[in-house]
Amino acid sequence: MFQPNMEHPDQDRAARVGAKLQARGWRLAVAESCTGGLLSHRLTNVPGSSTYFLGGVIAYRNEIKTRVLHVREETLARFGAISAETAQEMAEGVRRLFQADLALAITGVAGPDPIENQPVGRIYIALASPHGIQVRQILGGSDRQGNKALAVEAALELLEATLEGKPLPENPQGT
C-alpha cells in the first residue's frame, strides 16, 4: 500500500509539480470527493497556477459522480464510491470534461464514520494521462483533517513521481 511521508509534508511539492507541468505545457484537472476541494486549494496556492491548472469538480455525492464525471452507475453499485474503479472513472471523466493532459481523482472515507463498509481512512487516488491510468490506495487513521491532508499529499506525490518518471512502490492490490 502506498503511503506518503506525512512526518514532513512537503509544502513545496505543489510548486514543484506546477513548474514541471508548466515546463511541459501540460494542463491538469482534478476530481475530488472526500477532500472537498483541498487538492485544488493546494494547487491554486501556487502563483501562476492558472497556466496549468484548468479546474476541478467536487463530486461529494454519487449523483454528481454519475451526472458530471460520468462514473457508471454499475460501477457504483458493484464496487461502491470508495473503490479503485470509481477513482479511475472519476479521473477519466474529469480529464475528458476539461480536455486536460492529466487528471487526478480522490475518493475515500475521511471520517469519522465508515461508509459503504469501508474503514475510515481508506482512500483511492487515480491519475489519468494519455499513457493510461494509475490508481493507488492509501490507508490513513481516524482523524478527518489528517486523512484529507494525507490524501492530498499522496495525490501530489503520485503526480510528482509520474512527472519525474519515478516508479512508486507497488500497490499490493494491483491497482
Image (tube, helix red, strand yellow):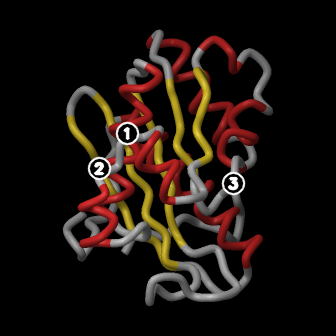
The image position of residue 5, as x and y in percent, is 59, 66
Q: Image point 24% across, 72% down: which residue?
A: 78
Q: Are marks 2 and 1 in contact (CB under 8 Å)?
A: yes
- The quadrant in which the N terminus is found is bottom left
Q: Amino acid at mark 2?
A: Gln
Q: Label 2: which residue?
A: 134
Looking at the image, tell me whether mark 2 or mark 3 is earlier in sequence order. 3
Q: Residues within 10 Å of mark 2 (few under 14, many from 20)?
A: many
Q: Amino acid at mark 1?
A: Thr
Looking at the image, tell me whether mark 1 or mark 3 is earlier in sequence order. 3
Tell me the CA gap for discs 2 and 1.
9 Å
Is 171 drawn above or below residue 60 in the view shown? below
Comparing labels 2 and 1, the label whose residue is closer to the camera: 2
Q: Residues within 10 Å of mark 3 (few under 14, many from 20)?
A: some
Which secondary structure lies at badge 1?
helix
Q: Is residue 171 left or right of residue 27?
A: left
Which secondary structure lies at badge 2?
strand
Tell me the CA gap for discs 2 and 3.
21 Å
Q: Label 1: which residue?
A: 162
Q: Is residue 55 left or right of residue 118?
A: right
Q: Is residue 143 left or right of residue 20?
A: right
Comparing labels 1 and 3, the label whose residue is closer to the camera: 3
Looking at the image, tell me whether mark 2 or mark 1 is earlier in sequence order. 2
Near-viewer residue (73 or 38): 73
Which secondary structure lies at badge 3?
loop
Q: Label 3: which residue?
A: 36
